[in-house]
Image: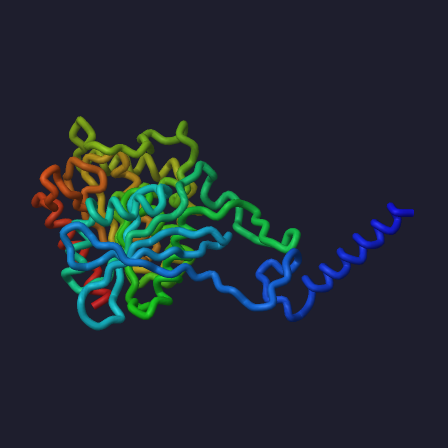
Amino acid sequence: MKAVTFFLLVLSWSSLIMAQVNNSDNKSIDPMWLFVPEATNNQLKPFKEPVLGSLIDNEIHFVELLDGVYAPIGIRTPSGEGPFPTIVFAHMNGGLGIQWIREWTNFGSGTLERFLDQGYAVVWMRYRAEVDTLYGETDLNVRQFQGRQRYTRGPLEYEDAISILEYIRSLPSIDPSKLGWVGVSHGGEMLMKVASEYDGLAVGVATEPASMDFIAKLPEENISVSSSPQLETMSEENTTDMQTQAVEDLRKAINIDLAKERISSINTPIYIIGRDRDHNQSVFRLNYELLEEGGKDVKWSTYDHEKHGFIFLKRNLEGDYIADDIQDDAIKSVIDYIDRYLK
């Protein structure tokens, strides 16, 4: 008898709780499981930190992504009245969180400082780390599952970037119509992925874009040039004839129809920068040629620099930002290109 009484009490209590949870006055984001009488919000208050050698602070924001986790970004705005034209910077692979933002803001922002001097707001962003899941293999769809989100696959880093771009465009200090992108290596490939699905960028620059996934490269055994990222210069000379042949070889090792389909939806003007003796120069060049053949607004330059990612100036051992002649020329060409669209 006691067991029956206890069961009825539990049933009555459960019914009461479910009635509360399903009440139309419930303001919870998780109403199947929780009753909340007053709405809360998802905003985390930004905070400022000083930057080594600069009078312009870094303002740390946390951006909510598709699945409710947060990505850190660091925003710096020039003196004067906004809203400002703004450049977001994507350096290779993701991950490493707020510590990465702090380190690169203080020790790897020589290029960003030049944009600040030209009146641009600048943003270092972090997104989740790259994964081995093939890009484009499965569409990202979400459905309700036990009152919450369930995805067909995990969100990818370029989808984080789209959420970040939308957040940046919502800020009062930012001109939403004048948002640009500068990315190197995987950050350059992400520009292609973002621009093929999102029209919020007014201009983009992809330096040494490792776009193997985006241009739909077939399995490695079907390609005659290496697709492994290299941090240093090729030891042998990579002549113009060699580069041309490598591009032709690579054309035979991609799904050309899929690559063209992806490129067809891009409306963003894009400047692609190669590196003459890079092992992936054929990828950089073919990415450019496919955009040009697709009738896109695209520019190409290439430089013979010894370092992968040379577009980003880092402090030397003495703590100074010192550019060589090639870096000076390349950075100036990037700023001039972006000025055409944002100024």
Judge whether residue 85 can be spotted in this image. yes
Residue 240 % position (x, y) = 18, 37
Q: From what the image shows, is residue 8 above or below residue 255?
A: below
Quarter of the view holding residue 229: top left
Quarter of the view holding residue 239: top left
Residue 58 % position (x, y) = 25, 56
Q: In the current view of this chain or complex, which residue is farthest to the right?
A: 1
At a point 57% along the width and 61% down the height, the residue shown is 29
Q: In the current view of this chain or complex, which residue is farthest to the bottom?
A: 81
User: Which residue is at the front of the view, 76 or 263?
Assistant: 76
Count of numbered marks: 0
Q: From what the image shows, is residue 13 above or below residue 84?
A: above
Drawn side of residue 160 relative to residue 1, left or right: left
Q: In the current view of this chain or complex, which residue is farthest to the left?
A: 325
Residue 47 % position (x, y) = 32, 58
At a point 92% along the width and 47% down the height, the residue shown is 1
At a point 84% along the width and 53% down the height, the residue shown is 8
Q: What scheme was used to colour the molecule? A: rainbow
Quarter of the image with the C terminus in it: bottom left
Judge whether residue 270 can be spotted in this image. no
User: Which residue is at the front of the view, 342 or 265?
Assistant: 342
Drawn side of residue 35 relative to residue 53, left or right: right
User: Which residue is at the front of the view, 82 or 267?
Assistant: 82
Residue 19 % position (x, y) = 73, 63
User: Which residue is at the front of the view, 8 or 271?
Assistant: 8
